[in-house]
Amino acid sequence: APKPDRANAGMWAIGAGHALTHAYSAAFYVLLPFVAKDLGLSYSQIGLLLALRQFMSMLVNLPAGMIVDTVGRHSLLMGLALAGAAVPYLVIGMTSSFGVILICMALVGIGTFLWHPAAITSISEMYPTQRGYGLAIHELGANLGETLAPLLAGFLLAYLSWRRVLSVNVAVGLLLMLVVVRIVTRARRQRI
């Protein structure tokens, strides 16, 4: 069975990036009641925010795959996806406008879904004999992000406002994004 080692650093970094794309949204679910109360949002408005994010992810599914195949700069696209998933949440933390929050949620949907075609293609190209293992690590990242981010957000809410928790989540994510992109870029050079 494949074991974590330096030769697999790229797939582990891709898994960590996938954790980030899921961590932002998972933490936001915990923050939503506080956002709704602070901004006076109705249940319908909250539902619209979440539905818009998912709709935009669905809408960009095919174009994102075509962009990845056409552009081919997988590390760059993964970096853009991570930034596209993070920065809108940072803006949400700074605004009280429902319209701006709607736009941000649409952008999150676009950003997060650009991740998948670039990441999965990278795993397949970089680890052609370990694709199953690489995809398992990729999915493990998503599960870890969805598990750990709500716990961290809940813990931080005991000490910080929802806006500060969102800022901390994004700041940590953006720092990790730099590490992930650097490791993936180096691994791609070594393996392809």
Image (cartoon, helix red, strand yellow):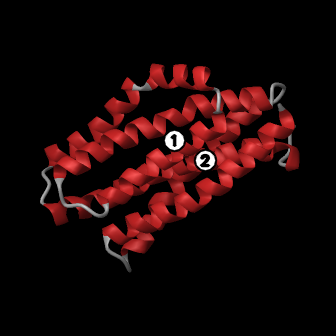
Q: Tell me which amino acid carries mark 1.
A: Ala
Residue 192 in picture, x, y percent from top left: 83, 31
10 Å crowding of disc 1: few (<14), some (14-19), many (20+): many
- In percent of width and height, residue 139 lies at 61, 39
Q: Which of 145 and 109 is in front in this view?
A: 109
Q: What element carries label 2?
A: helix
Numbered disc 1: secondary structure: helix
Image x and y of residue 127, in percent: 80, 31
Q: Which mark is residue 81?
A: 1
N-terminal-most mark, 2 or 1:
2
Mark 2 residue type: Gly
Q: Mark 2 points at which residue?
A: 17
Task: Give the distance between the C-alpha atoms of the residues marked 2 and 1, in whole angstroms.
Answer: 9 Å
Give the left or right position of residue 175, taking residue 63 as reference. right
Residue pictured at 64% horizontal, 32% vertical: 73
Residue 137 picture location, percent across and down: 69, 41
In the image, residue 138 sits, relative to residue 168, either above or below, namely above
